[in-house]
Image (cartoon, rainbow, N blue to C red):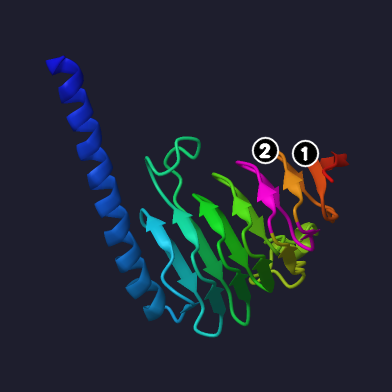
Amino acid sequence: MPYLLSRRLVYLSNMALAQGHRRVSSLIFGLYAKSKGVKMSNCPGVSGWIYLDIHPEGEMKIGSDCRFNSGAGRNPVARNQKASFFIGKNAKVIIGDGVGISNSTIVATDNISIGSFSLIGAGCTIVDTDFHSIDFVARQQRPDPSVARKPVSIGTNVFIGAFSVILKGVTIGDRAVIGAGSVVVRNVLSDELWAGNPAQFKRKLN
């Protein structure tokens, strides 16, 4: 009994510390995000340190009641990966209400939107650019003159499984599900399940 009681006390202490850490992380993120020009309906619930690299002419909006995880111990699947947002000149990242993002990386050079109540699983990557040209001559130039970029749109109530990659130009419809580890290169319609590399249609959900 004493052993079980001590374990219970340790567990409750750890839970209380974690809750306190989330409150502090949320407060710090709120101040940090405002200093970067982020527009927020209210401060999201944050666990861990989130990296923001936002160009002065870039834009980021976060809806109400969002939740972000970042770093070691925040999501056991994500290992030690931190959540990061990179927003270039004239680029936008628009996040709706009630969105959850866990230990993921988002890179916007054009426009990335995530609809309300969507969940981005551990270790995902969402980008609207190829970063480099497929032409080796163009890649030798600085800057690369022919990098392709297209907006990414993720609908409402979408679930994107852990370690998935969403590439430029993709639109994912409302209530769609993307299986873990998928690489999405084509549009996904609403209420569809896609998975694989490259991701392929599996079945309708409704």
Which residue range is magenta in the image? Answer: 157-174
Choose between 65 and 90: the one closer to the eye. Answer: 65
- Give the quarter of the image for residue 107: bottom right
Amino acid on which the number 2 mark rests in the picture: Gly
Q: How many labels were placed on the picture?
A: 2
Q: Which mark is residue 195?
A: 1
Q: Which mark is residue 29?
A: none
Which of these two is toward me, 67 or 140?
67
Disc 1 secondary structure class: strand
Q: Main secondary structure of the magenta part?
A: loop
Q: Residue at x 50, y 63 (%)?
A: 66
Question: Residue 78 appears at what percent x and percent y?
Answer: 49, 40
Q: Which residue is mark 2?
A: 181
Residue displayed at 40% across by 44% down? 74
Q: Quadrant of residue 99?
A: bottom right
Q: Is residue 138 left or right of residue 102?
A: right
Q: Verify CB contact (< 8 Å) between mark 1 and mark 2.
A: yes
Q: Residue at x 67, y 68 (%)?
A: 112
